Amino acid sequence: MAPRASWKGYLKLSLVSCPVRLYNATTRVDKVQFNFLHKDTHNRIQMKPFEPELGQVERSDLVKGYQYEKNRYVVIDEEDLAKVKIESTETINIDKFVDRDSVDLIYQDSPYYLAPDGRIAEETFVVLREAMRKANKIAIARVVLSGRERAVTIDVRDRGMLLMTLRSPKEIRNHAVYFEDIPENGVDHEMLKMAEQLVTSREGTFDTEDFVDQYEEALLELIKAKIKGEEPVISAEPERGKVINLMDALKQSLEEAGSKPPARSKTTRRKTAATKKPTTRKRKQA
C-alpha cells in the first residue's frame, strides 16, 4: 500500500510545472508515549472541551475564533478559509536557486519527501531533478502547509527530492545575548594544540546507527519489568567525573585516545621557569 500524501499540488519553475506529492519524512510511531490515567481506577482520561456557561460540549460544536480585543473574537469557518487562495496554496513555485551552504541550519524545520504525482509527471520531475543535481544547487520556494505559507528549500535526494520547511526570521532568537559574555580569544596556545589533537583523534564518519536512544531503551526495559510484575532494575547514577585541572584533563584524554601530548614550546618552558621562585644562597662569612 502506497504511503498517504500529506499535500498534493504542482511544482513550478517559470513555465515548467508538474503535479507532485509531499510525504512526511519523519515519524514518531516507534517512540514511547504515555497516556494520562486516573491514579485509582487506571482508566484513561478523556480530554473533553469545556465551555464556562454550558459545561462540557461536543467537539463538533467548536469553531475557530480570532481574538482581536480582550474577550472579543471574530469567528472564521472553513468556507472563509477556502476563500483565502494564493498561488502557493496549490503550487510550490521555485523563486531561485542558491548554494547549499548558504542556508543556515538554524532555519531548517520539518523535512518532507517530494515525488511526482503519476507517470505523466515523471519526465518533467526527473528533468528538474537532474538539472539541480548538475548545478549542485538547492531551490528556494514557497508553499502553504497547515494553514500558513512557508518558505522551503528543495534538494535532490536519491531519485526524488527533499523539501525542508524553513522557520521565519521572527522565530529565531538573536544569539548575541547568549554569547556576549564568552571570551573571544586569549586561549592558551599549548592547551589549544592539545585540544586540536584530541579532536583529530576522534575523527570519524557520520553513521545513523551510532545514534541509539539509550534513555528510551532503558525506559522500555523498565516498562517490560513493570508488565511482568517485576521490580525494575535501577541503573547506577552516571559518573560525572572529577573536577581536575584543564591541562591535566587534556593530557589524560589524549593518553586514553592513544596519543601523546605535543612537546611544550620554548615559550611555555620560559614562562614556567619564570614563575619559579629563585633560590637564594647565604654567603659565607670571612
Image: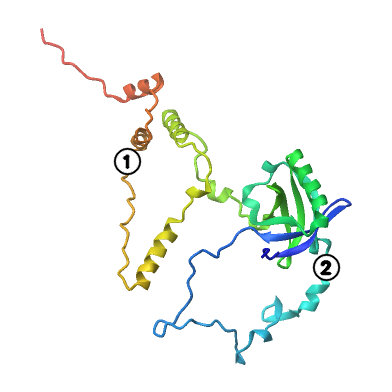
The image shows residue 233 at horizontal and vertical percentages of: 31, 63
Please report whichever mark, 2 or 1, sits nearer to the chain's N-terminal start: 2
Identify the residue position indicated by label 2 in the image: 85
- Residue 216 vs residue 185, the one in the foreground: 216
> Secondary structure beneath disc 2?
loop
Of the pair 46 and 233, the residue shown nearer to us: 233
- Residue at the spot x=32%, y=59% of the render? 235
116 lies left or right of 108 = right
Q: Position of residue 151 (x, y in %)?
A: 73, 56
Give SS at disc 1. loop
- Label 1: how many residues lie within 10 Å, few (<14), some (14-19) or many (20+)? few
Is 182 drawn above or below residue 35 in the view shown? above
In the rendered view, tell whether residue 271 sits above or below residue 117: above
Task: Name which residue type carries label 1.
Answer: Ile
**Residue placed farthest to the top in the image?**
286
User: Mark 2 belongs to which amino acid?
Assistant: Lys
Task: Tell me if 254 is positioned left or right of 115 in this view.
Answer: left
Mark 2 is surrounded, within 10 Å at the Cα level, by few (under 14), some (14 to 19) or many (20 or more) other residues, namely few
User: Which residue is denoted by mark 1 in the rendering?
Assistant: 244
Q: Which residue is drawn at 32% across and 44% down?
A: 243
Residue name at image x 49 percent, y 51 percent: 211
